[in-house]
Image (spheres, grey):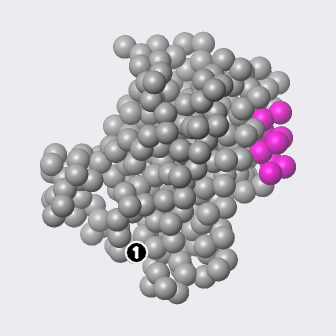
Amino acid sequence: MINLAGKTAVVFGLANKRSIAWGIAQKLHEAGATLAICYMNERMRAEAQDLINELGNASGFQCDVSNDQEIATLFAALKEKYAKIDILVHAVAYAPPEDLKGEFINTSREGFRIAHDVSVYSLIAVSRGALPLMTEGGSIITLTYYAAEKVVPHYNVMALAKASLESAVRYLAYELGPKNIRVNAISAGPIKTLAARGVGALGDMLKSHAERAPLHRNVDQSEVGGTALYLASDLASAVTGEVIYVDCGYNIMGF
C-alpha cells in the first residue's frame, strides 16, 4: 500500500470525470496526498469544483497554463497555502480542432504554435514555478502518447507536440535530478477524454488498440492513475527521464 500522507500534489488538467487527470487525482487522494486541483478558467470551474468536493481536503485553483502571470499567481498562492509541494501532474494538451481533422500538410502556423505552447511549454513553465516549492525533492509527471514515435492518422500536429514533450521530460530530468526531482511521462493508450474527442477517427483508434494490444482491450483512467501513483511514490525513487507505457501493450506490436 503506497502512503502519500503528508505529501502535497498539484494536478493540472482536470476537466471532467473522463479526464485522465481525474483518474490520477483519485489515486493520489486514496493514498493520502493533499491535492491542489487546477482548472483552466471560470467556465470550467463549476464542473471541476464538483469533482474537487469528492476529494475530501482538496482545494481548487484557476490557472491558464498559457498565461505566465496566472502561473506566477498560482504558485504564490500554493506557497502561501502549502509552503512546499511534492508532486506535480501535468495533464494538459490542446491543438485547434481544425489542425487535428484535416491533412497534416495543411497544419497552420498558428495551430503549430498553440499546440506546442499549451502542450509542451506549459510543462516547462509549471515545473519552473514548482521548483522553489519542491524543497524536499519531488516527482513531476506528464502525459504523452505513442504518436510521438509512430504515425497515427489524424493526430497530426499534436504528435509533434508530444515528441517535443518527451524531449522536454529528458531535459528537465537532467537539470532537476541534482535537486532530487524526478520527471517522467506516462504514454497512455487512447481514452475517451474531452481532449481526445477532438482527434479525428477516435473510434477507429480505440478499436485498433483493443484488437492489436496483447491484453486485447483499452486502458482506463484508473490504470493510468495507478502508474502515476507509483511514479509519485518512493517506489520510483530511481526512475526519471522515462516514458512509461500504459497501453495494454499496444506499443510493442509490429502489426
The part of the chain drawn in magenta is 68-76
Question: Left or right of 222: which side holds 253?
Answer: left
Q: Position of residue 240 (x, y in %)?
A: 49, 33
In the rendered image, residue 69 lying in the magenta stretch gets the answer yes
Which residue type carries mark 1?
His
Quarter of the picture holding the N terminus: top left
Q: Is residue 165 above or below residue 59?
A: below
> Does residue 231 appear left or right of residue 164 in this picture?
left
Q: Position of residue 171 (x, y in %)?
A: 59, 45
**89 lies left or right of 144:** right
Image quadrant assignment for residue 173? top right
Q: Is residue 149 above or below residue 31?
A: below
Q: Residue at x 74, y 26 (%)?
A: 133
Q: Which residue is mark 1?
A: 154
Most foreground residue, 148 or 81: 148
Please tell me whether mark 1 sits on a helix, a strand or a loop: loop
Which corner quadrant holds the C terminus? bottom left
